[in-house]
Image: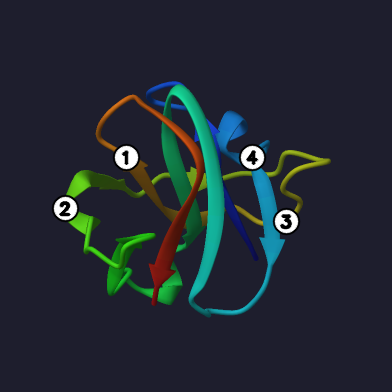
Amino acid sequence: APIFYGVGSANLSVAQLQALSKRITGEVSFNALFTTVNQKIYIAYPASWGLLASIQDQNLFDITADFTRTNPNFTNNPGYYEGTTMSYYVYEYNNLTTLTNFKVYFNF
């Protein structure tokens, strides 16, 4: 099952989350660069992987508390998500922000 990550407005729908960047991988920590203009940062991954251990900014400060976690079901959405209905964890940054090439580390 893929990890979805990227930026968007507040409270993205499941279909909008599925249209973000997608990475096919196992449960493994990774980092990504984000450029936002008055937007929020998102990551979504299968809930069966468990909670993230931490989210760190490019200065390695723990910013996990700056995200809100939800637990929606991802459903079949051909082109973005194809498969059975699956429970996902979605982390949404709490604030609209403007950043350029800001690195964020997601640690499992």
Q: Amino acid at mark 4?
A: Leu
Lower position in the chain sequence, tag 2 or tag 1: 2
Residue at 28%, 69% (x, y): give it.
54
Residue 47: name its quadrant: bottom left
Residue 16 locus on image (x, y percent): 59, 29
Q: Which residue is mark 3?
A: 83
**Nearest to viewer (mark 1 / mark 3):** 1
> Marks 2 and 1, how far apart in space?
9 Å
Q: Amino acid at mark 1?
A: Tyr
Residue at 81%, 40% (x, y): give it.
78
Q: Which residue is mark 1?
A: 93
Lower position in the chain sequence, tag 4 or tag 3: 4
Front residue (pair 22, 73): 22
Q: Which residue is mark 2?
A: 65
Element on which disc 4 rests: loop
**Nearest to viewer (mark 4 / mark 3):** 4
Q: Amino acid at mark 3?
A: Gly
Element on which disc 3 rests: loop
Q: Which residue is mark 4?
A: 20
Residue 58: name its quadrant: bottom left
Element on which disc 1 rests: strand
User: In the displayed structure, would residue 26 be above or below residue 47?
Assistant: below
> Marks 3 and 2, how far apart in space?
31 Å
Point out the image quarter for the N terminus: bottom right
Sort mark 4 into few (<14), some (14-19) or many (20+) by Cα contacts within 10 Å: some
Tell me, yes or no, whether the two marked residues, 4 and 3, touch with CB atoms within 8 Å: no
Lower position in the chain sequence, tag 1 or tag 3: 3
Q: Amino acid at mark 2?
A: Ala
> Marks 1 and 3, how far apart in space?
27 Å
> Marks 4 and 3, how far apart in space?
17 Å
